[in-house]
Amino acid sequence: MSAMVETIEHSDVREIRMARPPVNALDTELCRALIAAIDKAQGDDIGGIVLSGGEGVFSAGLDVPYLLSHGENRHALMDSWQAFFGVARALAESRVPVAAAITGHSPAGGCVLALCCDYRVMARSVDPSRPYAIGLNETQVGLVAPEGIQQLLRRAVGVHRAGCLLVAGELVPAERALDIGLVDELADIASVVPRAVAWLQALLQLPHAPVMQTRAIARADLAVALHNDNIRLDRFVEAWYLPETQQALQAMVARLKK
C-alpha cells in the first residue's frame, strides 16, 4: 500500500484515509494509490468503505502546481486527469457501499470524490465564523466543470441550484451544504469517521440482496455521468491551455504561496 494512503479496519468496514500532507492535494500518485486501495478493499470482501482525509481538510482537490509543472506535456497532463477520473469511477462503480467522511474543507476534486460516494458525513467547525466548505469552484480558477461532473452535483442538489453554484464557483459552508442536500449529515470532527462507519454498519444489517440491487438501480446514473462522453477529457485538456485559464491558475498558485 502506498504511503499516501492509510487503511484502518472497523470490523467489516475499511477506512481508506488520504495521507498526503498538508492538504491531500490529488496528484497522479495519490489518485493511483486510492484506486488500488478501493480495488483491494473489494477484493478482500469488505462490507463497506469509508473514504476520509486529514483533520481540517478532506482534500483540497487537484494539485494545481503539480499539474502546471507538466507544462506543454499534454500526455502527462492527460495522464494526471485520467488518474483523477479513475478514482471517481472507482468510487462510483464500487461493488460495496462507500461513505465519505469529509473531515474538513472539500473544494473542487475533493467535492467530486465525495459526490461519488453513497453517503456524506461532513465535519462541523468548532468556530462557527470559520465553517468548513465544500463545492465545485472551478469557474473561480478559470476552468469549466465537465458535463458529467455537473450531473453529479445536480443529482445531489437539483438542477437549478446546481447551475447557480456551478456558475458562481461557490463553496458552500457545511450547515448550508446539509440544508441543500450536498451532504447528508454533520458531526463534530472527531465523530465524522465513526458516524460514517455507523451508517455503513447499519446498512449492512439489512437484507443484503435487496439492498445491493436497489443500490445498483439508484446509482446507475453515476456511471453514465462519468462515461467518457460526458467528461470529454480531450476538450478539457485543450481548454486548460487557454491563456485566460492559465492566467487564472497561475494567480491561484501565487495566492497559495503567500
Image (spheres, helix red, strand yellow):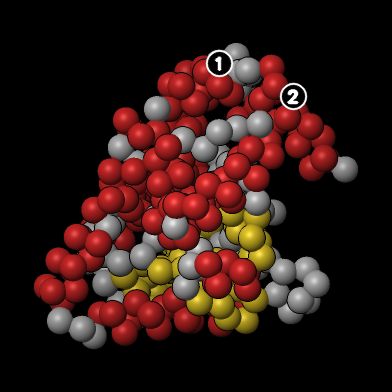
Rate crowding at label 1 as few (under 14), some (14 to 19) or many (20 or more) other CA atoms within 10 Å: few
Q: Identify which amino acid the numbered label 2 is placed on.
A: Gln
Q: Secondary structure at mark 2?
A: helix
In the rendered view, tell whether residue 228 sits above or below residue 50. above
Between 161 and 128, the one lying in front of the other is 161
Between 127 and 178, the one lying in front of the other is 178
Q: Identify which amino acid the numbered label 1 is placed on.
A: Asn
Rate crowding at label 2 as few (under 14), some (14 to 19) or many (20 or more) other CA atoms within 10 Å: few
Kindly identify which residue carries mark 1: 73
Residue found at x 44% / y 43%: 149
Residue found at x 28% / y 51%: 221
Residue found at x 55% / y 72%: 179
Residue found at x 34% / y 43%: 225
The quadrant of the image that shows the C terminus is top right
Earlier in the chain: of badge 2 and badge 1, it is: 1
Camera-side mark, 2 or 1:
2
Q: Position of residue 43 (x, y in %)?
A: 23, 58
**The label number, if any, that marks residue 48 in the structure image:** none
Between 121 and 201, the one lying in front of the other is 121
**The label number, if any, that marks residue 247 in the structure image:** 2
Q: Position of residue 12 (x, y in %)?
A: 30, 77
Looking at this view, name the residue that lies furthest to the right.
258
Alpha carbons under labels 2 and 1: distance apart:
18 Å
Looking at this view, name the residue that lies furthest to the top.
72
In the rendered view, tell whether residue 62 sits above or below residue 155. above
Q: Position of residue 177 (x, y in %)?
A: 57, 66
Q: Position of residue 231 (x, y in %)?
A: 39, 33
Q: Answer left or right for 96 relative to 189.
A: left
